[in-house]
């Protein structure tokens, strides 16, 4: 068991040796998540077990952590707790992926060594919400700081009538 996770792994070799990886990956190293994160502090705990079931090389385990995502309503931080089980079947072709048992997702390996963070990022991207937002109505709770913001908020609350220009012509008789 390793406390410090390797950057690159050979999943088939680890499956043959019944390897185990436990440790933490810093959120700052997860580049593909940068656009949806509000803050890249913290880490994701990784607990992976490699093995074989007959001819099937597999990875089972769990990833857990707390990520600060960017709320898509108010653009402020919203905490998202991640605790997800992983069940991957290591395959080298699409045909092998089609023959996987239903409870396994394929991990297509074309090279011997692959970045461990790519596996973790893939799993996180699959479970994170597509539109992260607060549970409460965060726009209603947002404080209005100055008079300009208050005026804009008042204008946004009242829908503009698209026929208001015609109403002016009706009153003046210019039409």
Image (spheres, grey):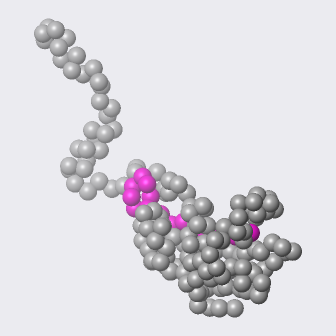
83 horizontally vs 26: left or right: right
Query: Split into 4 quadrants, where in the image is the N terminus?
Result: bottom right
Can residue 122 be seen in this snapshot? yes
Compared to residue 160, the image places residue 23 above or below, namely below
Q: Which quadrant of the view contains residue 71?
A: bottom left
Residue 29 place in picture, x, y as percent: 47, 77
Q: Give the range drawn in magenta.
A: 70-89
- Residue 75's place in the image compared with 38, above or below, is above
Asked whether residue 64 is in view, the answer is: no
Location of residue 160 (image quadrant): top left
Q: Nearer the viewer, residue 110 or 114?
A: 110
Q: Quadrant of residue 121?
A: bottom right
Task: Measuring from the top left, give residue 75's x and y in whole percent.
Answer: 39, 58
Residue at coordinates 77% horizontally, 87% vertically from top-left? 17
At 68% from the left and 79% from the top, the residue drawn is 11
Q: Nearer the viewer, residue 106 or 78?
A: 106
Q: Residue at x 29, y 24 (%)?
A: 162
Question: Most extreme residue toward the right, as rendered?
Answer: 54
> Magenta segment: does it hold 83?
yes
Indicate left or right for 139 with 4 as reference. left
Along the line of sight, the residue nearer the viewer: 97 or 72: 97
Give the residue drawn at x 28%, y 41%.
154
Q: Quadrant of the C terminus?
A: top left
Number of numbered discs overlaid on the protein picture: 0
């Amino acid at each position: 068991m390793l406390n410090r996770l390797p950057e690159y792994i050979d999943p088939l070799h680890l499956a043959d040796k019944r390897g185990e990886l436990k440790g933490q990956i810093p959120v700052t190293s997860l580049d593909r998540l940068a656009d949806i994160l509000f803050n890249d502090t913290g880490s994701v705990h990784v607990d992976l077990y490699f093995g074989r079931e007959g001819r099937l090389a597999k990875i089972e385990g769990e990833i857990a952590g707390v990520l600060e995502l960017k709320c898509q309503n108010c653009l402020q931080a919203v905490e998202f707790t991640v605790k997800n089980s992983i069940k991957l079947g290591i395959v080298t072709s699409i045909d092998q992926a089609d023959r996987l048992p239903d409870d396994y997702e394929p991990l297509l390996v074309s090279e011997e060594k692959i970045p461990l963070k790519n596996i973790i990022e893939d799993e996180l991207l699959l479970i994170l919400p597509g539109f992260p937002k607060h549970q409460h109505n965060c726009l209603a709770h947002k404080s209005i700081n100055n008079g300009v913001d208050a005026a804009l908020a008042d204008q946004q609350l009242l829908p503009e009538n698209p026929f208001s220009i015609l109403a002016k012509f009706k009153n003046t008789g210019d039409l």
